[in-house]
Amino acid sequence: MMRIAIAGASGRMGRMLVEAVLDAPDARLVGALDVAGSASIGRDAGDFLGRATGVAITDDIDAGIADAQFLIDFTRPAGTLAHLRACATRGAAMVIGTTGFDDEGRRAIAAAAERVPIVFAPNMSVGVNVTLKLLELAAKSLREGYDIEIIEAHHRHKVDAPSGTALKMGEVVAAALGRDLKKVAVYGREGVTGERDPSTIGFATVRGGDIVGDHTVLFAGTGERIEITHRSASRVTYAHGALRACRFLSERANGLYDMQDVLGLKD
């Protein structure tokens, strides 16, 4: 039985994760974390479902993960890094779906993975990760004569842009083309921009309403366009992917992995 703690347990994604863990026959909820000052502190993690779990939401990281083998974290970079330090000290594995990390944050995750096993992925959806594999194939086949643009849309509450999934798509496409995304990405256009540099990869961001997550990669050629799109209608796919990641980590002592590893999609 996997003993799992959830970070951000009272948020939209956190609640979906709590419900998924409670419904999984091979998992048990043993901890629930939230930020200090949250109205949910002290309440049962299953209150929103009308289910008593016996697990109170706490802002004490050490107490929240005291009995956990795994911490699933879809929060904010600063919070995730604090959780990371605690998990590395206590030997708990992590599944990190948080986005918006800078290079220093990514290095901290890689360093912690030398001590504990970590799955770090901007999107835990099985469908998104299959889409990434399709993008790799498409980019290799369409490397000449096609301009590449990535369009993503999310709900009004998302605080980072472009989304971590959009950036991952850009990284996959750039790598397939032998390019460095940091050098070829264009994150905005305004005014007189001149002709498009064919080596660039453009990003466009939409924020509004309750959009869970839409991503399209457009390969625009002369006389034709190829669009590869993934649309999420529910966060439940992310929760199920996170549980799949926990099962994957249960057989590993340390190391940094992503969902491509979990799903066996790497060559």
Image (tube, rainbow, N blue to C red):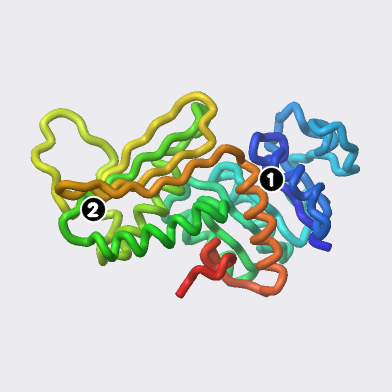
**Residue 54, position in %: x, y?**
90, 43
Pick the residue in front: 238 or 138: 138
- Give the residue type that dot 2 points to: Val
Can residue 63 be seen here? no
Can residue 239 be spotted in the picture? yes
Q: Residues within 10 Å of mark 2 (few under 14, many from 20)?
A: some
Q: Residues within 10 Å of mark 1 (few under 14, many from 20)?
A: many
The answer for how far apart the CA atoms under marks 1 and 2 are is 35 Å
According to the image, label 1 marks what residue?
A: 7
Mark 2 = which residue? 184
Q: Please state if 184 lies on the left or on the right of 35 as rendered.
A: left
Q: Nearer the viewer, residue 163 or 32?
A: 163
Q: Nearer the viewer, residue 138 or 55?
A: 138
Q: Quadrant of the rendered structure where residue 8 is?
A: top right
Q: Position of residue 237 (x, y in %)?
A: 62, 47
Mark 1 falls on what kind of element?
strand
Residue found 45% across the figure and 48% down from its top: 165
User: Percent position (x, y) of residue 143?
Assistant: 22, 61
Residue 16 position (above or below residue 200):
above
Q: Check contact, mark 1 vs mark 2: CB within 8 A.
A: no
Q: Is residue 254 above or below residue 75?
A: below
Residue reaching furthest front?
Answer: 223
Name the kind of residue labelled 1 in the image: Ala
Look at the image and tell me in which quarter the N terminus lies.
bottom right
Could you tell me which secondary element the residue under label 2 belongs to? helix
